[in-house]
Image (spheres, helix red, strand yellow):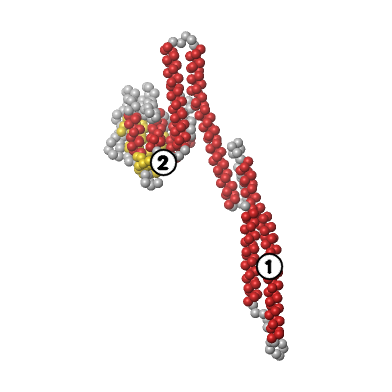
């Protein structure tokens, strides 16, 4: 780089010097030599020939000395160009050395290039921004691995304890053994759900290989039907059961008092707890993407809204076309959420209530965010003043990508 810049500087100086020399030479060449005169007489032929000879000699001398000066200045310009190029490239060498020293262990270091706000300073600041994002990504990866290891280790430890207890207790009867096996089977299912969620998260963050036309309304209807088929609500504990006025843009109404059921759409609330009322307002919302991932997104939203709700609460789900976007929104009447904590819930293994004991691992909303990003969708989440969470996901409308 330094050599190329030196050649450019030197070549430019030599070229401009040669042009200046040529112009000067042409100006002198085209000037008329002085005509010698003898007092009282006209110009003589010998004097005119002598003047022309002197003019020609002057031109040759001017050309020779100018070429020698140009050659000398060209050499000087190459030397000066080499020094100037080195001075100009010194910040780049500093940046290069600093970047070579940075690795995964010291990615927190920054270039912090001093000097005026020029192109090199802007480049250094851009690299610092990249390093900051890499640092954040590495930290997030470390937290993710640590949390995943913790979530997997807990059921494994419990399984080991149950098996060890069964082996040490020689007097256990068949009923006790069946109870232990049931608990082991439940722990195995929890691990399977965790691994499935981790795979879905990895698949979503890897982007989409293809996009198929789909309608958010059809997918939302399937999720609602799954909720309706999950089973009856808790008897007599939901005063609004069967009396909702959920509406659809096509004239049909959906209102159910069942939480999402098996098959990847969550589980009903615990026994004795009134299930939330699910109200759907479904309208045509065409977009393009992976239908299975979009269904998982909506199912996770419904599952989260049902699980983290108040007894006898309500879950509203709707789809619509709005401008150049296909929108799916869901809101619930859950517990109050501090506004500053909302977007933390979309990080892996993050839950607002860590004292809550259930088989959720805090991956549902992080999967929602990853699927939304893979579909170039915009996600917004707001804590509702009366409690609960309102989430909207804006997909690109079909045909407008």
Residue 230, x across and y down, in percent: 34, 27
Instruction: Estimate the spatial distance between the alpha carbons at disc 1 and disc 2, rounded to whole Å.
Output: 67 Å
Furthest-bottom residue in this view: 40
Residue 306, x across and y down, in percent: 39, 30
Furthest-left residue in this view: 251
Furthest-top residue in this view: 171
Res. 268 mark: none
Q: Is residue 358 visible?
A: no
Residues 219 and 245: in front is 219
Residue at image mark 2: 210
Q: Residue at x 50, y 19 (%)?
A: 160
Residues 312 and 295: in front is 295
* Callout count: 2
At mark 1, the secondary structure is helix
Horizontal placement of 235 versus 156: left or right?
left
Q: Is residue 67 visible?
A: yes
Q: Is residue 356 above or below residue 214?
A: above
Residue at image mark 1: 67
Q: Is residue 328 above or below residue 357?
A: below
Q: Choose top left, top right, bottom left or bottom right for residue 99.
A: top right
Residue 50, x across and y down, in percent: 71, 81
């Amino acid at each position: 780089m330094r050599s190329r810049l030196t050649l450019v500087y030197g070549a430019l100086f030599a070229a401009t010097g040669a042009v200046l020399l040529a112009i000067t030479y042409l100006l002198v060449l085209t000037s008329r030599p002085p005509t010698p005169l003898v007092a009282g007489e006209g110009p003589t032929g010998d004097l005119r020939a002598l003047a022309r000879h002197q003019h020609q000699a002057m031109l040759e001398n001017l050309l020779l000395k100018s070429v020698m000066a140009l050659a000398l200045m060209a050499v000087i310009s190459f030397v000066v160009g080499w020094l100037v190029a080195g001075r100009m490239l010194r910040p780049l060498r500093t940046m290069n050395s600093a970047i070579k020293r940075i690795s995964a262990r010291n990615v927190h270091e920054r270039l912090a290039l001093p000097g005026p706000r020029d192109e090199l300073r802007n480049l250094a600041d851009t690299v610092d921004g990249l390093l900051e994002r890499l640092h954040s990504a590495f930290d997030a990866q470390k937290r993710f691995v640590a949390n995943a290891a913790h979530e997997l280790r807990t059921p494994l430890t419990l399984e080991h304890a149950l098996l060890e207890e069964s082996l040490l207790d020689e007097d256990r009867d068949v009923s006790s053994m069946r109870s232990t096996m049931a608990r082991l089977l439940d722990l195995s299912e929890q691990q399977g759900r965790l691994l499935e969620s981790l795979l879905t998260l990895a698949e979503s963050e890897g982007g989409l290989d293809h996009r198929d036309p789909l309608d958010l309304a059809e997918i939302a209807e399937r999720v609602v039907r799954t909720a309706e088929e999950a089973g009856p609500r808790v008897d007599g504990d939901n005063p609004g059961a069967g009396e909702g006025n959920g509406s659809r843009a096509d004239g049909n109404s959906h209102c159910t008092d069942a939480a999402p059921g098996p098959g990847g759409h969550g589980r009903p609330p615990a026994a004795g707890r009134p299930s939330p009322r699910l109200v759907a307002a479904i309208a045509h919302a065409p977009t393009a993407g992976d239908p299975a991932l979009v269904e998982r997104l909506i199912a996770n939203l419904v599952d989260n809204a049902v699980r983290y709700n108040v007894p006898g609460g309500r879950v509203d789900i709707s789809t619509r076309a709005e401008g150049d976007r296909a929108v799916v929104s869901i809101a619930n009447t859950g517990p109050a959420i501090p506004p500053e904590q909302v977007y933390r819930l979309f990080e892996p293994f993050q839950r607002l209530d860590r004292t809550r004991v259930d088989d959720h691992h805090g991956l549902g909303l992080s999967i929602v965010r990853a699927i939304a990003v893979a579909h170039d969708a915009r996600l917004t989440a707001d804590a509702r003043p009366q409690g609960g969470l309102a989430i909207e996901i804006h997909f690109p409308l079909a045909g407008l990508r």
